[in-house]
Image (cartoon, rainbow, N blue to C red):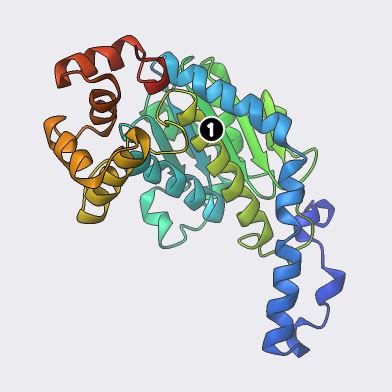
Amino acid sequence: MLDKLTTEKRNGKTMNLDLMSVKEILETMNKEDQTVPQSVAGEIQEIEKAVNKAISSFRKGGRLIYLGAGTSGRLGVLDAVECVPTFGSLPEMVQGFIAGGMKAFTKAVEGAEDDEALGAEDLKAISVNENDTVIGIAASGRTPYVIGALKHARSKGAATVSLTCNKNSEISKYAEIAIEVETGPEVLTGSTRLKAGTAQKLVLNMISTASMIGIGKVYKNLMVDVQSTNKKLVERSKRIIMQAAETDYDTAAKYYEKAQRNVKAAIIMILLNCSYEEAAQKLDESNGFIRKTK
């Protein structure tokens, strides 16, 4: 079956890869990488559907769940982990699973991706349900671990999405939404951590970011739910308040503390000239959307 996958085919432009100079290798890789965003653009309609499913899940108190093996799994875990500091989301809101468990993040667990049951077991462990959106990620589009997860998710009524880099992939048969970004043969034959991995990361970034925007975690183009967990993020929080409320640094810093380091509340306190308690109430009434506060 591998010879039918475009991700496994040999790239005619790199048949003499081992004879190229370092500069030639880099230039070739760069040219190949430039084709990835165009391939992603062809799947915007399906990506939009996935985002709408995730937004719906969040509004119902559900979760966005990624599953994959190898690079695909690692990219899902990475995107999920980054949502917490960027958007102030709870860790369980966006979750990533990799075949073989978290130990497989840094060291391959042989055979884990070939076991359908493991995918189902990972979802059973978190009681996946009809409020959730599950995205199965596999560059090849045929990973049994992902198929098992999607089968189980469907049986529980969850929204299901496939993300693959081959058309008419096997995993797409088990998903109601199929995102198939065909990135073509890799510079290094079969090394899907390259173009395929780049495409997957682009799509996952799009899904999580657009979904968080859709539930009010962004004002204008500012990450107003950022968590101030280190000195850099404390300063970023103050700058966000400055930019959103169009005020000076000292005022932003003062309201940042008055708002108990809640960036959104600080912005509303300045814009609407109200107390922290009033700002908190307005945020609650507007479901977290700054633009909808009055």
Q: Is residue 118 left or right of residue 206?
A: left
| Residue 259 placement: quadrant | top left
| Residue 272 placement: quadrant | top left
Q: Is residue 45 left or right of residue 253?
A: right
The amino acid at mark 1 is Ala
Q: Is residue 178 above or below residue 228?
A: above
| Residue 48 pos. (x, y %) | 65, 28
**Residue located 17% across and 34% down the image:** 255
Q: Could you classify mark 1 by the number of other residues whose Cα lies within 10 Å: few (under 14), some (14-19), or many (20 or more)? A: some
| Residue 25 pos. (x, y %) | 71, 81
| Residue 266 pos. (x, y %) | 23, 30
* Residue 109 shows in this picture: yes
| Residue 184 pos. (x, y %) | 79, 56
**Quadrant in the picture for the C terminus:** top left
**Residue located 23% across and 12% down the image:** 281
Q: Nearer the viewer, residue 242 or 92?
A: 242
| Residue 258 placement: quadrant | top left
Q: Nearer the viewer, residue 20 or 37?
A: 37
Q: Nearer the viewer, residue 190 or 185?
A: 185
* Residue 188 shows in this picture: no
Q: How many marks?
A: 1
Q: What residue is pinned by disc 1?
A: 210
Q: Is residue 59 above or below residue 258?
A: above
**Residue located 37% across and 50% down the image:** 102
Identify the element where label 1 is drawn: helix
**Residue located 70% across and 63% down the image:** 33
